[in-house]
Amino acid sequence: MTRPHHHNRPHYHQGATSATPLLYPSARHPPPQVSRPFFHPLYILDYLFTFLLLGFSLYLDAVPEPFHREFQLNDPDIAYPRKGESVSRTMSWVMALGGAMLVVTLVWVVRLVWSFKGGDEEDWWSKEEGADEKQWWMEVVLKDVHHALLGTFLSVTLTFFMVTVTKLLVGRLRPDFLARCQPDPITLNCRSNDTSEIRKGHMSFPSGHASRTAAGLGFACWYLVAALGVGCFDGRRPEGRVWRVLICTLPLLVVLYVAVSRLQQNMHHWEDVSVGALLGFTISYICYRFYYPSICEGKGLAGRPKGGEGKGPQGEASEERPDV
């Protein structure tokens, strides 16, 4: 069936189907895309529910008393000395959210520079000669940035909620719990007047710092993998591509640093940071796939935000998929 031509749709040449990365020139040819606004009104509900979940998580993190485990004075796992934090709670939030946004910004800076130098019209994000400048910014650039922002925010918030609930239910003691509690040798009742620190001493598992940074920077990692084409394991020649893999590992190094710092400062056991980081990475991928196709999606779709484009059941570009 012949489909009507729409002048607002970007034109793509047909032919090659190479899986070249999307950050730099590509020979991929995406299917026609339905022109849609970058911000659907229903996104307001997404932000509303995410903020409500964040507020509820902050309440759980500050008010309810966690499960109190019994302990012994001769338990070496909780007898470590108190140390200062090298990565504060606030800094972990900045790393998770700000770090991801920094990655997205840098990717678009490179894309814009490449586009101004001539670029490649086959890339899904490229602006065709003579195309409307405002429309391109709204439907391509801002759409991608908005999806990345909302996806990162959802990833970090959902991880924070899951971790906080687990902390309250498990009530595992931190390695420096005895130093926080200063228990009476007879009754084992805490003699310290700092009830806030004692409460935190019962919330070791899993690590909030490790999970939070893994949720935010994990999303950034998936974003980079799709932008650089690292996730496409096909028959292409591999030479000259190692640098792409190294770039994708940079967010992971930050997560590793935060996780190790929690061990060095006697704030967590190794199981706490391991499970926390794994949980954060898992949720980050779920949230990434909620707003983006698979990192190894073919036909130029990897790294291209969802929103009405794609293939219908008959193999034609579907216009019936909701932009939500």
Image: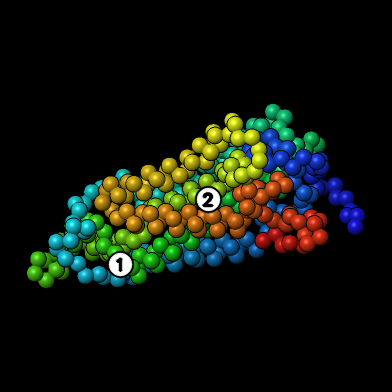
Q: Secondary structure at mark 2?
A: helix
Quick check: 281 left or right of 311?
left
Q: Would you say 210 lies left or right of 76 here? A: right
Q: Judging from the image, what secondary structure is the residue with disc 1 in?
A: loop
Q: Is residue 10 visible?
A: yes
Kindly identify the residue that appears in the image at 44 percent across and 64 percent down.
Answer: 161
Q: Which mark is residue 26?
A: none
Residue 194 is situated, as x and y percent measured from the top left of the image, at: 21, 61
Residue at image location 66% in from the left, 50% down from the top: 297
| Disc on the earlier residue, 1 or 2 | 1
- How far across and how far down the image is residue 14, in percent? 81, 42
**Looking at numbered disc 1 in the image, what kind of residue is underneath it?**
Gly
Q: Which residue is mark 2?
A: 219
User: Where is residue 44 shown, x and y percent of the image?
Assistant: 61, 62
The answer to whether residue 180 of the structure is visible from this angle is no
Q: How is the image coloured?
A: rainbow
Q: Residues within 10 Å of mark 2 (few under 14, many from 20)?
A: many
Q: Measured along the vertical axis of the image, is residue 239 above or below residue 152? A: above
Q: Which residue position holds label 1?
A: 171
- Quarter of image, res 70: bottom left
**Which quadrant of the structure image shows residue 202?**
bottom left
